[in-house]
Image (spheres, rainbow, N blue to C red):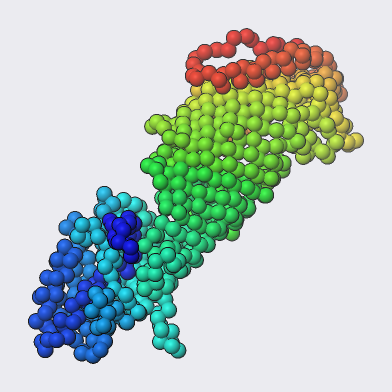
Amino acid sequence: METLSNDGSRKERRRSHPHLTWYVVAAVVGFLGTLAVVVITLPNWNLLRGPIAQFLSAKLNRTVSIDGDLKVRVSLQPEIEVNGLSVANASWGAHPMMAQIERTRFRIELIPLIRGHVVIPEAQLVRAALVLERNSEGTPNWEFNEGRAAGAWGPEVGSLTIERGELLYEDAPVETKVRLAIESDLDAQQGSILTIRFAGRGSLRKEVFQIEGRAETLLSLARAGRPYQLDVRVVAGDTSASFAGSLLPFKLETIDGTLQLRGKDLSKLYPAVPVPLPWTPAYRLSGHLLREGGMWSFRSFKGIVGASDMAGDFSLDRRGKQPIIDAEVTSQRLDYNDLAGFLGVPPKARSQRRTAEQEHEAAKRAATEKVLPSKPYDLARLRAVDGEVRFRGKSIVARDIPLDNVVAHLILKAGKLRFAPLDFGVADGHVVSDIGVDASGPVIKAAADVTIRNVDVKILVPELKANEASAGRVGGRAELKGTGNSIAQMSASANGELAVIMSQGRLSTLSLLLTNLDLANAAELLLHGDKNAPVYCAVVSGTMRDGTLIPQVFVVDSSEEKITGEGAIDFQNERYELRLKADSKRPSLVALRGPIRVEGTFKHPQVTPEAGPVVARVAAAVALGALLTPPAALLALADPGGARDSDCTALLAYGEKTAANARKAAQEKDMDPATERKGAAPKAH
């Protein structure tokens, strides 16, 4: 609406905010003050209750009534007392009354009234109940005739005391409801009013919270341009927030102060913070909160999430139809357990207990044979906001796997999430990922393109350091696509291919011999110490079809043995069906020489020798021992060796080709699960 400035020009007045109860309080007191001169001249003041109520009703375009006594004490500053004052709500309001005041008492100066200026040295409100609300269109009930706010013609008040006040605020557009008890605080020595105290309960989109705090006297709201000091604490379940700072009166879109957050799970901040955060462990964060219009920022924040440190800047732009976030986050030490929520897994239990929802999911996972997370992602949250997040982590604590220099750039727009890139260092090597998640439809479409470069196996597997094994370096590539609203569903429907290769490495001779159950040579190594065996090449290449990974090539060729594998890994049923066969390259007197089977579930895998060949060789040894002499039984267990070397050149070339095919497939829009790759894998000669 418009008001006249001192020079007579018109200027635009900003719409008032629902929290500014001063508007309505000032209006009620001001209306009474404008009639004070008439009131003090009558012997029976109750005769004026009707005319005053009619005058106020016309001013507010609301029904105003005075049901109690009207009292006046005549002096140069008359004291007026009004009992039973009530103001009806807007016609669309959810409550019949906007204001009900059991008793209001105030003094008014007579001389300023001659100039049309209302000056009230002091005022008191007792049992004042006020209802402020906005309807679904955003219209506030504190705008009266022609959209004017009550404060547009309010008086000048010296001091205001509120006893047993109550405020109810309802905001339909943001689904907020708050009920507060308000009381003025007095200085015990000087008797002056310093602050007001408030406390109560509320809800934001059905999330219940409690609120309490202190603020400057409501009269400070009338001092245009001067920051209004506020100290407030909000608790919602396991989440608490405290704010100490200021806001500008009549312009509450400007907020500036320190915000501290504490809770068991950052995802519980939704929907107050419309960011699709995953489950997290307990956290403590603090930073500088600033609001300028529809732009919110949480600057220079720092704190702890689980066992990880976090710092950075966060902003939320709510000026458009779709909220937009922008964040820059860094961590010096990141615990990989704190990232479990991104996969739908509850965080690791620590000294502080997890939330009830996290505990329920943890118990559910413990009671099932499944390992892959089945908790569905919240599609509505992924579509509720757009934005970008840039993350850098110096080091990651991941058991014995050394990870460092994590770089992640997350882009979310219209329900489509992409990590481009998600990079990190591992074992002196590098892993580069491009991951996309399209949640714009009813079922998520996911795609992952992962490249492994120059990973040092010796660093990756610390146990190899004990025998000074120079285990070589590993590289590879994987391209996978799947659909589903959880990690388990995506894995069960995945299609794609992968390849991992290693050359010029060395591995423990003992572990290689035990693969072939070479008991004699293994015993020698146990007595005299382990040695290293050169690994000519190691290639694992396969395809994923409808959630089943089938190795096309599985060869580890060393100077001691040649290990080949076959079978499948079923991600839909979460089962292993692998068979590893080791062929020795040197003779041994006691070698059971039987394939090893890897079976069972992901949660309870079983690694056992294949029963048939081992039992047959032991039975033959027993028979020979019974017919001839016990030493003759060793003949049945003897292994002459003689396995041929693999064509490592061809195998490595095939692995590299498969990795290249993965790159090509990543660029294709769709993949037909029934299509077979052209070209057969080379035989491991």
Residue 127 is at least partly visible in this image: no
Instruction: Indicate left or right for 180 with 578 as reference.
Output: left
Vertically, is 468 above or below 232? above
**Which of the 4 quarters of the picture holds residue 508?**
top right
Quadrant (top left, top right, bottom left, bottom right) of the C terminus = top right
Instruction: Indicate left or right for 22 with 578 as reference.
Output: left
Residue 462 on image: x %, y %: 77, 39
Residue 485 on image: x %, y %: 45, 34
Instruction: Between residue 371 and residue 501, name the one nearer to us.
Output: 501
**Which of the 4 quarters of the picture holds residue 664?**
top right
Vertically, is 555 above or below 316? above
Residue 51 is at least partly visible in this image: yes
Instruction: Between residue 91 and residue 17, name the one nearer to us.
Output: 17
Residue at 49 percent of width and 32 percent of height? 437
Residue at 45 percent of width and 69 percent of height? 229
Residue 370 on image: x %, y %: 52, 37
* Residue situated furthest front in the rendering: 7
Residue 39 on image: x %, y %: 16, 82
Vertically, is 371 above or below 181? above
* Residue situated furthest right in the rendering: 528
Instruction: Indicate left or right for 27 with 609 as reference.
Output: left
Instruction: Indicate left or right for 669 with 134 as reference.
Output: right
Q: How many marks?
A: 0
Vertically, is 294 above or below 47? above
Residue at 65 percent of width and 27 percent of height? 451
Quadrant (top left, top right, bottom left, bottom right) of the N terminus = bottom left
Residue at 25 percent of width and 70 percent of height? 27
Instruction: Between residue 153 and residue 486, name the one nearer to us.
Output: 153
